[in-house]
Amino acid sequence: MIGNGRASVSAVADLSRANLADMGAATPQAVKALASLGGWGQHTQNQERDLHKWVSNLFNVGLQTFDLDMDLQVPNKSGTEKMTIPFLLPHELFHALAEAGPAQFQLSMTGGRSCREIGSFWEHCFMQDEWKNHPAKHLSSVDRDRLIPIAIHIDGAEMYSNCEFMVWSIGSIFPSGEVWDVKFPICMIRHEWMADPEVKRAAHGTVAKVVSWSMRQALKGKMPTVGPFGEGLIGVRAERASKLLANGWKFAYFTFRADCKARKEARNFDRSYQHVQICEICCAERDSKHGDGSLSFKDFYPTAAHLLTQFSHNDYLRATSSVTPWASMPGFSALSALHDPMHCIYLGTCKELIASALGYWNHNSYLVGCNLQDRLRRVSFRLKASCKEAGVRGPFNTLTPSNTGLDKADYPELGSSFKACSVKSSLWFYAMFSSELARSHPEARSEHVKQ
């Protein structure tokens, strides 16, 4: 229950102590252990810490955090101070997953793919522009059949009320399943500690340097002999120096995933959604009195001028005024920074397309009802009933003229109350519904074909 988020550590500890009081000596040992958290409830603030220690010892995790000293802002104080941020080094995380056994490694890294399938995947990728110059293609020491492609993800997340963190996480692109098994946070820093733009830029640069260094070790397949800043190693890390990593498996950077805000902040892009030059890898522009109208990003025709200006990775390095700190990552390419589907599709294009489709159907009298609000209410009822019957789950909002933007003169768009999960779940219904409307109004279809 704790692992899937259905209950907090404090709630489970309270229930365990109540169970212990009722059952006494008959209480299972696992329940007793949970009841003992925080000194048997005397120090509740330590319950989560105690659980982490207990689980680590129970399953022999063998992971240690790397203490990363960074200059960050302390709330209500001027200037910056040295703060120690706990950091999970990617290569050590990969090694721990391999040491956990083949079942866990398959679940978290290979996704059930065979070595031959992994090798074929890389052979295909090396023919694409995004990865044709990847170092793994040219290193004779790298066995492509045992090379795991790694994605790096960056986004903000609210951990507590009014307390948001920037979270860096990594994971293999192969598996899909419980997020606890496939996506691993490696660093978290509170936003208020990076309120100053220069402090934030320096923090992103430091994290990028450490992750790039760690991924370089993962690609070599050997434990490092020195730290990310050239410092000597101590303890377990010193004992493991130069030893084989992850039972012979190697790991390579493959892609970078983030929404537009995180892409701009983490990679120092000077072409972004906040600039006139809106695209990172071409000369597309937003409408501006100082811009070039022929390069408008709104031109989706195959003859669009901005399609003739696409950059290669080297073009990007020459054109940018501030090279991203991730440029030192082995295999990094500006072209391999993929867009986040949730923000680009489900919270972006789809919200406009669904609202536009509803407006089009209403304008052409395809929807049934006495007025716009009634027609949208009927569509909502049909949406919920159809999805329930088909077993499609999701929080489905009731459509209104206000939350669809159909009460405005400009273009319609679903409002902020429509979350990604509800948009994604409802796509099936709108595809089915539009097919029904096309079949029931063949004359409209024929007219569009003529046009």
Image (cartoon, helix red, strand yellow):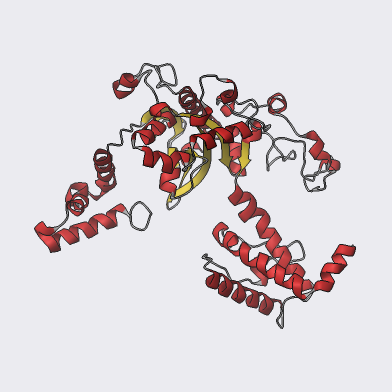
Q: Vertically, is 414 above or below 306?
A: below
Task: Give the x, y percent position of residue 365.
Answer: 78, 76
On screen, residue 13 above or below 51: below
Inspect this view and state whether residue 127 appears. Answer: yes
Viewport quadrant of the N terminus: bottom left
Find the residue positioned furthest to the right: 450
Q: Residue furthest front?
A: 116
* Quadrant of the rendered image containing residue 224: top left
Query: Is residue 290 among the parts visible in the rendering?
Result: no
Give coordinates of residue 307: x percent, y percent: 79, 39
Report the number of discs.
0
Residue closest to the far bottom: 370
| Residue in front for this viewpoint, 115 or 207 | 115
Name the residue at 24% across, 38% down. 57
Percent position of residue 297, x then y: 77, 45
Left of 288 or right of it: where is 166? left
Left or right: 17 in relation to 407: left
What x and y, as percent, mark residue 93? Answer: 40, 33
Q: Is residue 198 left or right of residue 11?
A: right
Residue at 51%, 45% in the rendered image: 156
Quadrant position of the C terminus in the picture: bottom right
Could you tell whether 199 is left or right of 335 in the image?
left
Q: Which residue is painted at 60% across and 38% down in the image? A: 263
Q: Nearer the viewer, residue 284 or 364?
A: 364
On screen, residue 46 above or below 133:
below
> Does residue 92 lie above or below 286 as drawn?
above
